[in-house]
Image (cartoon, rainbow, N blue to C red):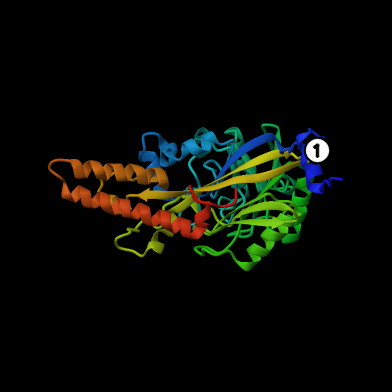
Amino acid sequence: MMKISVLSIFVIAVMGGCQDLTPPAVPIRLPQELARVELVAVGDILMHQDVKTAAAQAPGGLEDLWREVTPLFRRADLAFANLETPVAPTTGRPGRPFQFNAPPELPAALKASGFTIVSTANNHAFDQGTKGVAETLERLAQAGLATIGTGGTRPAAEEARILTVKGLRIAFLGFTDIFNNDLNTKADRPWVRGLDPAEAVAAVVRARTQADAVVVSIHWGAEYLHTPLARQKDLARKLAAAGADLILGHHPHVLQPVEILEIGGRRTVVAYSLGNFISNQDRIYRADLFPVAGGDSRDGVAFQCRFVKLKLADGTEQVRVENVLCEPLWTLNNWREARGAKSKTREIRVVPLTATLVEAEAALDRLLAADPVDKAKVLEQQEHLRTLYLRRARAGEILGAGFMAGGTAPR
């Protein structure tokens, strides 16, 4: 009798068309995107006298000082800045060194440029007294700008500002850890919200129950220091654990790192310092005459991220912060050229570094292709280009190269 092996039986069964034992494919259920909101944030808006002079001499006024960055704000759903100046021409005094007062045109200029929300909680909030706080809030509201961190009363200053964009509810909270002059006296008078760590954590917990995402703005840290203090890092982790999705820091007037915290299965993005947006600081800096650090207060960043609301496979909903990207900014300042030249227009202008580098390279190519070559202009353009390269490298070094345009940061 012929013996049939197990292998033969298997082959016969397969060739004979036996039932397919391969388990059926299980469809993979990807998260469903329910909403997407783009945010861009910049640092300190400082109204030094030369900034106001430059605006007065510019054809388009204040808007001209950052016109080349305006497309970033207008493309975003939310655009944030730290407004480090009162706007109180009626109740306040003219601005002077270390005591600011902005032109009445500033709120409308910010709104027209695409800004939607500003923090008014910082060490210059009381520069024009309590009446200046009240007038500033009134003028910003008239321009259609949302504010956080100050209010006509303490409860108003400490209330989360919830903005609903594309169906996504985003809560904003504002604090300052530094006061030049603390005029908080009675809760029924104009108030600037200080930073008490325990109260800040509790505020985030409350806001978490009211909104899909929570953004915390904090005026903190040490001026001109590129490293966050241990106290800042500790508080950032506590706020992240409490439910903050994004922490936007300002005050040092220079850039500090961006960091992603993973706590309790959630992601929190921390920008410890956004640097200056517009100012007259480091006006004498020239890359060929000073160490690179001599221009740090003219560095800024347009911090960009995306809030994405997802419906997960199990039916639950979650908001994530994604696409973190830093566009370095640089403030052009012609103080040296304008000094002593009465006919020279004062120019202070914020530019996006990446695009400006491309334009500067093209301008140098045109100069080199000219016949005859203007050697003086070539040398001037080469120095300008070198400055831009140095500033971009400096920003990447501080912020974290992976977060720069074209970088490889976690998305």
- In the image, 13 versus 149, the foreground residue is 13
Residue 271 drawn at (x, y percent)? 58, 54
Q: Quadrant of the N terminus?
A: top right
Residue ranking furthest to the bottom: 230
Name the residue: 37% across, 54% down. 389
Q: Is residue 98 above or below residue 61?
A: below
Residue 396: x %, y % from top left: 47, 56
Q: Is residue 306 left or right of residue 394?
A: right
Q: What's the amino acid at mark 1?
A: Ala
Residue 152 appears in view:
no
Indicate left or right for 333 with 274 as reference. Answer: left
State the SS at label 1. helix
Q: Which image quarter: residue 222?
A: bottom right
**Is residue 273 something that shows in the picture?**
yes
Left or right of 307, for residue 301: left
Q: In the image as oriented, which residue stretches furthest toward the right? A: 1
Depth check, front residue: 288 or 137: 288
In the rendered image, residue 384, in percent from the top left (x then y), is placed at 30, 51
Residue indicated by mark 1: 13
Q: Residue furthest front?
A: 1
Q: Nearer the viewer, residue 229 or 259?
A: 259
Residue 264 lies, in percent from the top left, at 75, 56
